[in-house]
Every structure is written in structure tokens, then in C-alpha cells.
Amino acid sequence: MTASAHRAAHERRNLGLLVAAQSLGGASPPIIISLGGLVGQMLSSTPTASTLPVSLYQLGLALSTLPAAWLMHRAGRRMAYLLGAAMGVLSGLVAAWGISRSDFVLFCLGTSLAGFYGACVQSYRFAATDAVGEPSRQADAISRVMVGGLIAAVIGPQVVIWTRDSLPATPFAGSFYSQAALALLALPLLLALRLPPAPPRAQASGARPLGEIARTPQFVVAALAGVVSYGLMAFLMTAAPMAMVGCGHSVGEAALGIQWHVLAMFGPSFFTGRLIARFGKRCITALGLALIAASGALALMGLELTHFWGALVLLGVGWNFGFIGATALLTECYRPAERAKVQALNDFLVFGTVAIASFGSGQLLHTVGWGGINAGMLPMVALVLALLAWGASRQRATQTTT
């Protein structure tokens, strides 16, 4: 086998392992999100605190991005990912124990601990760029790993259906034991990863300060595109079921709308990378944001089931293009020695926004309504589209002068 063939086989192996790990790790959030509120209602003495376990998971994910990145830089991605999966096992066991003891605080601790595992799983897309190396292939590698999210979107809900009543004395505990089992299955896959090591200290010593990188136009545009794409998607996905039920639609119709939304989120990953390779990162990112704006416009046209479902499908496809495109744009912002801290800052901003959206979506829906939420997001999308256009013109001007 030639060196190039051996390298290609090594890359395929690593990407396959990352897809499988993403499929297992990405199944944890659907379990927590779909059952966290129900268990919260069952265990909490305060009705307003019922969604706290889900919000604490999102907060734990956001706060874990920085220590997870530090660990990746110091000990390598594989060691950090193994610890993340171990935390995933522990979180599921603690959450199930909290249910069995009817202890709301213990259950919340379990969902919070799952945030560290979630932060590691979210960084698998960056590990894919390390696996291939060549900048021209990174967008396709990110897209391929995100396909695992589509598999996870099937595994997570099915685990809930199969296991929520498996322990009649403690409803829902079986699903959290299953969450721990999924993380346990991911451990041997992550152990088999063979990713490039972190840059040596001599190379890392020449890295720019994080503040300097964060002020560059490239980082601002890439991070803001990721924040708006993911933040708006999470906010609207959380508010949509409540809005649908409030408008007279059934819980089953709301659940079906979310199912189509999730399929639309991850289904395009089969070809998003090829679209980016053909049309460019900025173009596909802008297309994703335009589709998110179109979902808001459709939602403003009416409150029929077709308006809700159509808006959720557009929102899902828009998130896919916008978030994968923004992730690919971010890879242009850093040198190899800077990657860990820049990726961590980006994910802290993105998932911090998601955590805030999780805490505030219900209150804002009650205050301004479904129409107000969708109208309010349009200026944010317009701002990022304007920045993308400005960045593209700036890049063309630089290429012309050189």
C-alpha cells in the first residue's frame, strides 16, 4: 500500500469512528430534552422549575466548552473525548438515581454533568478537520461527521420510546440508564481514534493572543454566523411546540413538526460539504441564514399547521447550511497552534447563546407571542448577511491588490 493510500484509509477510519461516536453521543440531548421537563414536573415542587434540568444541561454544555478545550490542548482530543464519554456514563447514572430517589436536585446534577459530554460531542466536527488536514476537504469532513446527528436524532427518541416504562416503579429512569449505556458504547470507538497530536510547545509559543484573534473580521463574522444560526434555531425549536399547542394544534402534531425539523437539520449533511466546495463557505452560510429568515417570514403568514411545519423544515435546513458553513469559515481564522482556544471561544459563544435561549424562550413567547419572536429575528439575520457580504467584498479587494 502506498503512503497516500495508507493516509486515505487512515482518514476514512477516523471519520467513520467520529460519525459512529457522534451517532451515540448525539443521542443524549434528545433523551434529556424530551424527558427533562416531564421528570422535572414529576420531581419538582415548583411548577416553574420543571424545565430547569434541560436549561442546566444547556448551561453545563456552554460552561464546559472552555475546560474541555484546555484538556484537548494539554492531553489531546482522544483523552478529552474519553473523559467526556465517561462523564456521559456518570451523568446518566446520577440522573437515573435522582429519579429513583425522587430527588430533583440530584436529577438536575445528572443533566448538568451531561453538559461536559455534550461539549466534547460538539467538538467532533473540529476533530474531523484535524483528521483530513487539507483545507479544501475540511468542509466535507465536517458535513460527514454531522451525518451522525441524523442517526442520533433517530436513536435518541427511539430509546425514550423503548425504555421510558421499562422500570415501572421508577418511570423514565430506564431512559437515563440507557443514556449511560450509549455513552459506554462510545468509549471503545473513541479509544480507537488516532488523531494528529496537539502542536508542540515550541510551535504553540508563537500563537497569537486570543483577544487579538477575536477582534479579526474573519472571526467576528464566523462566530456571529454560528451564534445566530444555532441560537435562533434553538430558540424557535423550543418555542414552536408551545406556540402550536397554544394555537389549538395537538401535542402529536407539534411532535411531528419537531421530528420533521430534526430530519431537516441533519438530512442535508449528506451533500452540504459538496455544496460548500462548489459554491464557497460564505455563499452556503448566507443561504442558510436566508432560509432561516424565510422560515420566520412563513411563520408570520399564518397559524395553520402548514405554516408551522413549513417554517420548522426551512429552519432546519437553514441551520444545517448556516452552522456547517460558519464552522468551515472558522477554520480560516486560526493557525494550528491556536485552534483549541479559538474553537473553544466560538463554542462558548454559540452554546452560551443556546443556554440563554433555553432559559428565556418560554417567557418571551408569553410576552411577545409567536409572531413577535419571528419578526424579531429578521434584523439579526439581516445583520449577519450584511457582514458576510462585507467580508466577501473585503476578501475580493485583498485578492485584487495582491
Image (tube, rainbow, N blue to C red):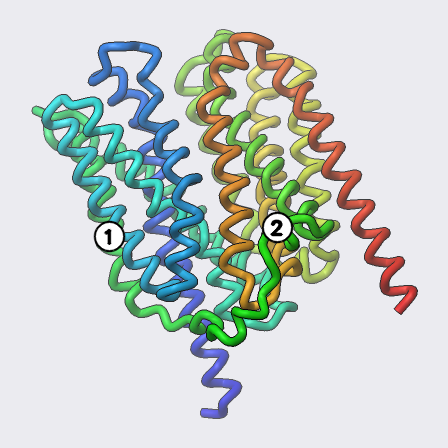
Mark 2 residue crowding within 10 angstroms, few (<14) / some (14–19) / many (20+): few
Q: Position of residue 250 (x, y in %)?
A: 43, 13
Question: Is 105 situated left or right of 207 in this image?
Answer: left
In depth, the one of 218 and 132 nearer the eye is 218
The disc at residue 283 is: none
Question: Is 350 situated left or right of 188 in this image?
Answer: right
Q: Disc 2 and disc 1: Cα gap in Å? A: 32 Å
At 26% from the left and 16% from the top, the residue drawn is: 41
| Amino acid type of the residue that numbered disc 1 sits on in the rendered structure | Ala
Q: Quadrant of the C terminus?
A: bottom right
The disc at residue 86 is: 1
Quick one: SS at disc 1? helix
User: In which quarter of the view is residue 319 placed?
Assistant: top right
| Amino acid type of the residue that numbered disc 2 sits on in the rendered structure | Gly
Mark 1 residue crowding within 10 angstroms, few (<14) / some (14–19) / many (20+): some
User: In which quarter of the view is residue 50 placed?
Assistant: top left
At 65% from the left and 42% from the top, the residue drawn is: 225
Q: Position of residue 115 (x, y in %)?
A: 35, 41
Say which label, 2 or 1, has the lower sequence index.
Answer: 1
Q: Is residue 357 visible?
A: yes
User: Image height check: is 369 above or below 392?
Assistant: above
User: Image height check: is 381 above or below 183?
Assistant: above
At 24% from the left and 35% from the top, the residue drawn is: 110
Question: Is 364 situated left or right of 159 in this image?
Answer: right
In depth, the one of 103 and 17 nearer the eye is 103
Reading the image, the residue beneath label 2 is 211
Q: Is residue 274 visible?
A: no
User: Image height check: is 2 above or below 114?
Assistant: below
